[in-house]
Amino acid sequence: MDFAVINTPIGALHITQEEDFITEIKYAGEYSAEIEPQTDLLKDAINQITSYFLGELKEFTLPLNPKVSPYRRKVLEQLMKVPYAETVTYKDLAVATGNPQAVRAVGSAMRTNPIILAIPCHRVLKSDGSLGNYSAGGPANKDWLLTFENQNR
């Protein structure tokens, strides 16, 4: 397992590579000592994250392998179909997975999403249009990301 840490406008991100896949992009607090990538894949991940925060990258092309249950994987796969600067609700994702009653399970999948940004859980809103929480630094970071994406369409 290899990893790197990069500081971004929303805080430090810890990126983990296992074999030929990115398995985590996690929020690591407001700021941290950066750890340089030692593999080509981690370098690519850092380059894509940097391009995203420059407003240049709209869709990540990293090989991802989140370590989650089969249902959560299904939710995350549906989430990856949500285009840049667009949003869906937890209910929309539950319906897309074929289980309209699974709104809480979708919320749990968002809360435990191990690959933020590349799997854009910040694009999921409550049914009333409010932000809800965000595991990567709270609702302020979610709001920042949504505003940023809308400004860089």
Image (cartoon, grey):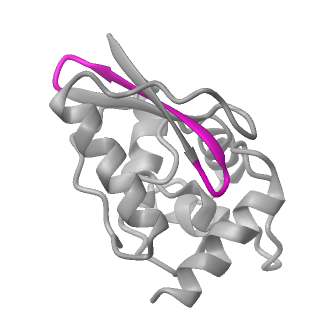
Task: Give left or right: position of 33 versus 55.
Answer: right
Q: Is residue 36 above or below residue 126?
A: above
The quarter of the picture where the N terminus appears is top left
Find residue 136 and report its horizontal and vertical position in percent.
69, 44
Query: In the image, what residue occupies the spot 81% across and 50% down?
Result: 138
Which residue occupies the extreme top position in the image?
Answer: 1
Query: In the image, what residue occupies the spot 46% across and 36% down?
Result: 71
Find residue 13 and report its horizontal and vertical position in percent.
56, 38
Q: Is residue 48 above or below residue 96?
A: above
Total number of numbered labels?
Answer: 0
Find residue 62 and report its horizontal and vertical position in percent.
24, 46
Front in this rendered view, residue 59 or 10: 10
Task: Give left or right: position of 78 versus 22.
Answer: right
Q: Is residue 60 above or below residue 153?
A: above
Quadrant in which residue 70 is drawn: top left
Question: Where does the magenta region start and end?
Answer: 8-20
Question: Is residue 10 found inside the magenta-colored segment of the image?
Answer: yes
The quarter of the picture where the C terminus appears is bottom left
Question: Is residue 9 found inside the magenta-colored segment of the image?
Answer: yes
Query: In the image, what residue occupies the spot 45% across and 59% down?
Result: 79
Query: In the image, what residue occupies the spot 50% across and 58% down?
Result: 120
Find residue 38 and report its horizontal and vertical position in percent.
26, 21
Examine the residues drawn in magenta and state their main secondary structure: strand
